[in-house]
Amino acid sequence: MKTYALVFIHVIVAAMLVSAACHSNTAGKKVQGTWKSKDGSVVIEITDKHFMMGTDSPIPEDYFVKDDTIFTSFEGNQPYTKFVIKKLKDNSMTLLLPDDTVAVEFHK
């Protein structure tokens, strides 16, 4: 009986870990794409591996998404640049850029 209980507990814990991993990955997939600000002055391109900001020879940076923040770095260098996600939908996103205290709205 103890063996069944231990197996059951391990299965539940594994299911919780897989669920948490899948949940955190959905935000990362939602941010992927080419985003343009409403006024067209800022363009952000996010692929599965790189974050590129700007239109004139953009420099690809590594990034990861944690909770409601996009962390970027050039070749793994720290400190990370932080972009806070205020609102994220399929075709619209509102970001708080690192240099600004004003939120910028983007669309795909």
Image (spheres, helix red, strand yellow):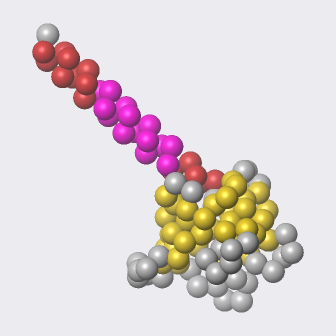
Q: Is residue 76 visible?
A: yes
Q: Return the x and y of residue 18 as percentages of the image width and height.
A: 40, 39
Q: Residue at x 57, y 57 (%)?
A: 68
For residue 19, what is the image quadrant?
top left
Is residue 10 shown in magenta?
A: no
Q: Is residue 33 left or right of residue 28?
A: right
Q: Is residue 48 visible?
A: no
Q: Return the x and y of residue 50 as percentages of the image width and height.
A: 55, 72
The quadrant of the rendering that contains the N terminus is top left
The residue at the far left in this view is: 2
Give the main secondary structure of the magenta stretch: helix
The quadrant of the rendering that contains the C terminus is bottom right
Q: Is residue 50 left or right of residue 101?
A: left
Q: Residue at x 60, y 65 (%)?
A: 84
Q: Is residue 95 left or right of residue 37?
A: left
Q: Is residue 74 above or below residue 27?
A: below
Is residue 15 shown in magenta?
A: yes
Q: Return the x and y of residue 39 as percentages of the image width and height.
A: 86, 75
Q: Residue at x 60, y 69 (%)?
A: 83
For residue 8, what is the image quadrant?
top left
Magenta-tinted stretch: 11-24
Along the line of sight, which residue is nearer the eye, 18 or 79? 79
The mark tally for this picture is: 0
The residue at the far bottom in this view is: 56
